[in-house]
């Protein structure tokens, strides 16, 4: 089963609901002058809201929720976290 999610309100990447598939979430931060905002990895908070797909109502003994990894700055003003799929489609 797959899960889809929205980034920037207009894209819907899909990853397998296998508790192992991952998708990078990349955020680029700039000030009003276009200068990269650096050193903010510890201040950025992201969360996952998940709604299970009603068509994938198969019961499992253990259901794993999707999760986000720690935020890291991968270049000046560019931050990344990795979304790891849960075990249920949504």
Image (spheres, helix red, strand yellow):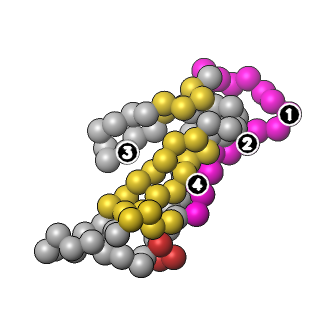
What percent of the width, then of the height, locates residue 79?
A: 42, 63
Query: Mark 3 = which residue?
Result: 7
What percent of the width, then of the height, locates residue 83?
A: 56, 48
The crowding category of the residue bearing disc 2, from other C-alpha atoms within 10 Å (few below 14, some 14 to 19, many at least 20), is: some
Report the Cα–Cα distance between label 3 and label 4. 14 Å
Query: Mark 2 = which residue?
Result: 64
Residue at 46% x, 38% y: name it: 5
Residue at 81% x, 30% y: name it: 60
Report the Cα–Cα distance between label 1 and label 4. 23 Å
> Magenta segment, which residues?
53-70
Secondary structure at numbered mark 1: loop
Res. 68 mark = 4
- Is 84 located above or below residue 58 in the figure? below
Query: Mark 1 = which residue?
Result: 61
Report the Cα–Cα distance between label 2 and label 3. 22 Å
Q: Quadrant of the N terminus?
A: top right
| Numbered disc in front, either 1 or 4 | 4
- Closer-to-camera residue (52/10): 10
Location of residue 90 (image quadrant):
top right
- Is 52 located above or below residue 29 in the figure? above
The crowding category of the residue bearing disc 3, from other C-alpha atoms within 10 Å (few below 14, some 14 to 19, many at least 20), is: few
């Amino acid at each position: 089963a797959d899960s889809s999610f929205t980034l920037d309100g207009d894209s819907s990447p899909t990853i397998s609901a296998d508790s192992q598939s991952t998708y990078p979430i990349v955020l680029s931060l700039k000030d009003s002058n276009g200068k990269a905002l650096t050193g903010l990895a510890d201040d950025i908070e992201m969360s996952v809201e998940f709604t299970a797909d009603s068509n994938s109502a198969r019961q499992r003994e253990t259901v794993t929720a999707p999760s986000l990894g720690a935020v890291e700055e991968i270049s000046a003003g560019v931050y990344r976290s990795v979304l790891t799929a849960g075990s249920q489609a949504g």
